[in-house]
Image (cartoon, helix red, strand yellow):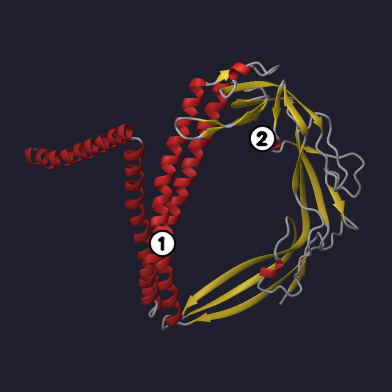
Amino acid sequence: MSDDSNASGSTSDSFTQTTSQSWFSRIGGALTGLLIGLVLLPVAGFLLFWNEGRAVQTARSLTEGAGMVQTVAAERPDPANEGRLVHVSGPVRAAQLPFDSDLDVKPPNGTLRLFRNVEMYQWQEENRSETQTRLGGGTETVTTSTYRRVWHEGRIDSGRFRQPEGHQNSQMRYTSRSFNAQGVTLGGFRISDAQLNGLAAGEPFTPPGGSGGDGDGTRYIGNDASAPRLGDLRVSWRTAAPDAISVIGAQMGEGFGTYATNAGDRLFILEPGTVPAATMFREAQDSNAVLTWILRLVGTVVMFIGWALLLNPLKVLADVIPPLGAVVGFGTGLLAAVLTALTVPPIVAIAWLFYRPIVGIGILVAGLALAYGITRLRKRRPQQEKLA
């Protein structure tokens, strides 16, 4: 074990552990992984298929909502619009400001949400492993665990450390949380506490009269900010204080609810500022597209992991001769990537045929026409070369 220190006075130490695994044990683990891979493949397929349906339903719901939404005045709810999808924009007010009672912090007037961020000075573990395959298929893994004192939001569970002794993290006296204003109104409409949660954190806020701060709006809870000790806290705040907000939802009495579309989604959108309904729907469509691609990527990664686990026993069997195992491992990884590339597009295509038959058939016909054109072009080239 070694010790070192940096300029800030924090310390770190390391712990090295060597473990061995026999070839027979690796075979057992590979077979277990094979079973997991057999589960992951249909899970990935379902995720990809479901994601396309979710994307289509959300897109249709937003298009449906954009075609029927009515922009109404914020001053007073019109009973004639009860249950209808409405768009309301205007100044927002709160009867009672949010208040951090734990630390006696009250934000300025106009604040709708107050966010408290708490960091603790604590131990953090970083692991680095190097595995070597020995002749006969067994492995030897050398893991070096480095422990450093860092500022980190939330408590790191030191009970999960490889070397918890001497690296225990205490419980936090305060934790990160948010506080909402009460009695929030948009003209004559009420905004519920749950709906207010749609507002994200905004500008940093420095409470007056803070002690022990670092000069950047943080409050230090400990003895000396220049020489932190384990368990010391560093607290900062942010506020969401828009002058106006815009809401799209179903008018329910003097408030709002979610609007059930025929396409299947329930619509409710809240944004800071005075935003036209068309812009809000366009931004929601963009967010839906981004989420669709993220879930496609997740499904593709899960599919690759499934194929890799399915093929991993071949590598372990070949690891009896380490150089051969490395070659087989490269081949199985490449094969898993190829199988993923061959599996994911058909699943997405089938989903499009199921959820968007007209568009799906159009893409399929275009793809077949392109493939036919390329084939014909290849056949013509040898004939032209012979004539030449």
Vertical placement of 169 versus 303: above or below?
below
Q: Secondary structure at mark 1?
A: helix
Hey, what amino acid is under mark 1? Val
Return the residue nearer the eye: 302 or 36. 36
Vertical placement of 151 versus 94: above or below?
below
- First in sequence, mark 2 or 1: give its number: 1
Return the residue nearer the eye: 340 or 359. 359
Q: Is residue 166 visible?
A: yes
Residue 39 badge:
1
Residue 290 x/y as whole percent: 50, 39
Relative to residue 229, is residue 247 drawn left or right? left
Residue 189 x/y as whole percent: 69, 24
Vertical placement of 157 versus 244: above or below?
below
In the figure, residue 38 lies in which quadrant?
Answer: bottom left
State the residue at coordinates (43%, 69%): 33
Mark in the foreground, 2 or 1: 2
Q: Secondary structure at mark 2?
A: helix
Residue 195 badge:
2
Vertical placement of 148 versus 366: above or below?
below
Hey, what amino acid is under mark 2? Gln
Tag 2–tag 1 contact (CB < 8 Å) = no
Alpha carbon distance from label 2 to label 1:
38 Å
Residue 271 x/y as whole percent: 64, 29
- The N terminus lies in quadrant: bottom right
State the residue at coordinates (47%, 26%): 64
State the residue at coordinates (13%, 41%): 379
The residue carrying pointer 1 sits among few (fewer than 14), some (14 to 19) or many (20 or more) residues within 10 Å by Cα, namely: few
- The C terminus lies in quadrant: top left
The residue carrying pointer 2 sits among few (fewer than 14), some (14 to 19) or many (20 or more) residues within 10 Å by Cα, namely: some
